[in-house]
Image (cartoon, helix red, strand yellow):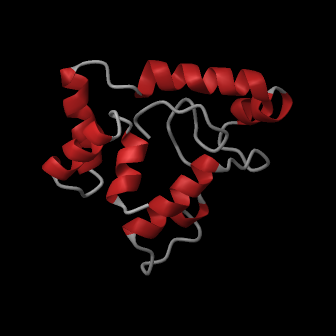
């Protein structure tokens, strides 16, 4: 990830993701959609016993309230578009996932510039 994410299975330093289908379990039969669905599932259901970031995993297990507070802070600090330029960057990030510019902008506007919700809508989820 380029955007910083506070999650046990994503490195808070490098953005590296701990997801088997992106490494050992990769198969040419996997589609972009299946990879994104697997990533979404991982982000929604962390696996702190197999972490990419041990510090985040420890906080997730030992102090869930602090973990949630820190994750919300990171969302506010790193993931929310703050200006028209940032909105253009959000459109660009969604387009990088293979969606058209107008579809991306429409979905982002509809979902309050929440990139995750916009991508879910574009994927028909």
Work out whether 38 lies above or below 54.
Answer: below
Residue name at image x 53 percent, y 54 percent:
40
Question: In the current view of this chain or complex, which residue is farthest to the right?
Answer: 62
Left or right side of 66 for 104: left
Q: Residue at x 63, y 21 (%)?
A: 70
Q: Is residue 18 visible?
A: no
Question: As rendered, which of 123 and 77 lies closer to the eye?
Answer: 123
Q: Position of residue 35 (x, y in %)?
A: 47, 64
Q: Residue furthest left?
A: 102
Q: Position of residue 77 (x, y in %)?
A: 46, 18
Residue 122: in sight, yes or no?
yes
Q: Residue 125: x and y, percent? A: 44, 61
Q: Quadrant of the N terminus?
A: top left
Q: Relative to 39, does residue 14 appear above or below in the rendering?
A: above
Q: Nearer the viewer, residue 55 or 47?
A: 47
Which residue shows up at 25% across the image and 58% down it? 98
Give how far across and how far down residue 68 sits, in percent.
68, 27
Q: Is residue 118 above or below residue 79?
A: below
User: Does 60 sit left or right of 35 as displayed?
Assistant: right
- Residue 114 in which image quadrant: top left
How many marks the image carries: the answer is: 0
Residue at the (55%, 66%) spot, across then down: 21
Q: Residue furthest front?
A: 110
**Closer to the camera in the image, 2 or 93:** 93
Give the camera-side residue of 102 and 31.
102
Q: Is residue 114 left or right of residue 51?
A: left
């Amino acid at each position: 990830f380029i955007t910083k994410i506070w999650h046990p299975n994503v490195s808070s330093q490098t953005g590296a993701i701990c997801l088997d289908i992106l490494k050992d379990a990769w198969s040419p039969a996997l589609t972009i959609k299946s990879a994104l669905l697997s990533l979404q599932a991982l982000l929604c259901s962390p696996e702190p016993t197999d972490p990419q970031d041990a510090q985040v995993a420890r906080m997730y297990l030992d102090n869930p309230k602090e973990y949630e507070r820190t994750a919300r802070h990171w969302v506010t600090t790193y993931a929310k578009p703050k200006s028209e330029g940032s909105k253009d960057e959000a459109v660009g990030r969604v387009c990088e996932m293979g969606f058209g510019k107008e579809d991306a902008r429409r979905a982002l506007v509809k979902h309050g510039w929440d990139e995750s919700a916009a991508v879910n809508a574009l994927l028909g989820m």
